[in-house]
Amino acid sequence: MKQLTFIIMSMIILASCGGNSKSEFNYSVDKFADVEILRYQVHNFEQLSLNQKLLIYYLSEAALEGRDILYDQNHKNNLTIRRLLETVYQNYKGDRTSTDFIAFETYLKQVWMGNGIHHHYSEEKFEPAFSQDFLTNAINQVDISLLPLLADENIEQFKTRIFPVIFDANLYPKRLNQEDGADLILTSANNFYEGVTQKEVEAFYAKMVDPNNHTPVAYGLNSKIVKENGQLVEKTYKVGGMYDAAIQRIISWLEKAANIAENDNQKAVIQSLIEFYISGDLKQYDEYSIKWLQDTDSQVDFINGFTESYTDPLGMKATWEALVNFKDLDATKRTEIISRNAQWFEDNSPVDNRFKKDEVKGVSAKVITAAILAGDCYPSTPIGINLPNSNWIRKDYGSKSVTIENITDAYDKASQGSGFMEEFMWSDNEIAQAKEYGSLTNNLHTDLHECLGHGSGKLLPGVSPDALKAYGSPIEEARADLFGLYYMADKKMVDLGLLPDKDAYKAAYYQYIMNGLMTQLTRIQPGKNIEQAHMRNRQLIASWVFDKGTIDNVVELKKRDGKTFVVINDYQKLRDLFGELLAEIQRIKSTGDFEGAKYLIETYAVKVDQKIHTEVLSRYAELNIAPYKGFVNPVYSLVKDKSDNIIDVKVSYDENYIDQNLRYSRDYSVLPYYN
């Protein structure tokens, strides 16, 4: 599970904390629409051994080779549209300062940011601000051999097929639809299903599930469902199957990495992943996952494959993602303390004892330095990850958690001096708390969310991991967030040396409630509901405690000078409410209570207070801050001597957003236009 939580927004909050000015490193790269593109530094890369640097290089190449898989998963026309836009951009001979061309360039940048034609966070389709006539004239300037036409397709047929996808707002409006009562498959634009209904898919997979199987595989994780001759068929992502060309290239780099692995365990992990890519067998995927989580000795680590199911409305099919990293040895001491005390946290959780793990196994956590982001981790990336997602593996073997500290550092450094805090915080007291403890408590909350939150609790016997269906992801993220929030205020945090002061947690509490009730709404278009799982999670928690705390006035919204502010009147009672909600959400998860999950999400997590929303958007606009952040990757290059021996790997930070994406499309694009 990824941590895409309030911390991303609180990086903006911390931006006005003062302190040192930006270093000479240029964090900000580009800005367009609602996005700012940043760089991140790969701290201490030069201190790694040559073998470790080479391992990062090979794993990074394997990561970049999967880029087109994600585009195609997000929508069946994404690769065609991206290649069309890039071809026009590179070959346009008209006025590049015209309003239409500038709008066209912005749209292309948005497509890169969203890995397709839908927004990476809101799930809404982008609306181009250039005209169909402009695109027609631009296409006419391009050599037809460069355009992504199907076999025997002419330009007019191509435009008839593709233009409505770009310009018709009513066609494929949402990548992921979670509207209650709708056929979630037919109304979602992703490419996990084609020509099938939600009922057909649910019946298809229901036949496979054995509730008595202690080690159930994650059915459908790595496949697309289509209908052939009236029957539902899985097209598996594997060698010889769907996405074969990209997977073959991923494997070629993984084989190079296996040959220089740091140790036998790491080599076995890589070889197991290769075997999964070859077979597509989900039992093999579980074997790989177990080997991966048990490798805690290697300094270099990676994620590569079909991992998270946020974009599937049924929460089954996984998007492709990759992350290459290495351990931050000093910062990891913090997460090691948490891991060693995992059983204490589980035993003292406010949830019903029936839903607690009797024995917490294999919990490991570390702070990492990201070396490359790819797939569903690029350009927008999580700041924390906990894997594997399989409940039975978590129960029997544990999980591995990471906090990506060089990414949070980049958010912080790039946003200094924004004025966000002064605009939205109630008083100097909350500002002072954020200045002193905000960064520390944000990172600690990520540690607790990933290391303990996702790894806590258990399902009762016979409960399917998919029982909550479309509500599963926001419920799971809320569970992990609440675990972290509840323990943030515990005396244990001070006793373990994780927080320096018994009141430090208040910085995290205030930022979380402010974000959940107000400031995250900067990411929602006027009149829209909340669709994204992490945003639903945050509003669920903030709105629920606001509602339940009304009698005791725990949290209130106060007006000053015509502006609304969050005020927390009783932090201890707020913690009690976090614990109460955690207990209920764990019950829902453990028992597979679909109706309970539906009630919480539909009541507290979806609808937006339009008056608050309008006000927040107006105040935020005055600050000129992009609500979303993405990243460009560093570039790695091999250094060779006169005999062609590799003597070093260099990292550079000179590539801009446009050049990087065009290079990726040139060097890592082997899939057909249409899959």
Image (cartoon, rainbow, N blue to C red):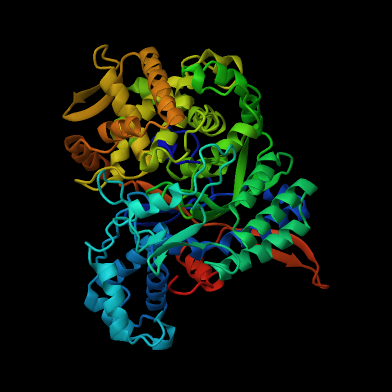
Q: Position of residue 281 (x, y in %)?
A: 60, 55
Is 95 placed above or below 18 here? below
Question: Which residue is found at the position 45% from the left and 60% from the top?
Answer: 224
Query: Foreground: 57 or 507?
Result: 57
> Do we see residue 105 in this rendering?
yes
Q: Position of residue 483 (x, y in %)?
A: 47, 25
Q: Quadrant of residue 258?
A: bottom right
Query: Foreground: 116 or 508?
Result: 116
Left or right of residue 15: residue 241: right
Q: Position of residue 479 (x, y in %)?
A: 44, 30
Looking at the image, the residue that sits furthest to the right is 643
Is 396 placed above or below 103 here? above
Left or right of residue 445: residue 393: right
Left or right of residue 84: residue 614: left
> The C terminus lies in which quarter of the figure?
bottom left
Query: Foreground: 496 or 197?
Result: 197
Left or right of residue 306: residue 81: left
Is 473 placed above or below 249 here? above
Q: Quadrant of residue 365?
A: top right
Q: Position of residue 155 (x, y in %)?
A: 32, 85
Is 122 placed above or below 387 here? below
Question: Which residue is found at the position 19% from the left and 40% from the top?
Answer: 614
> Do we see residue 331 in this rendering?
no
Q: Quadrant of residue 575?
A: top left
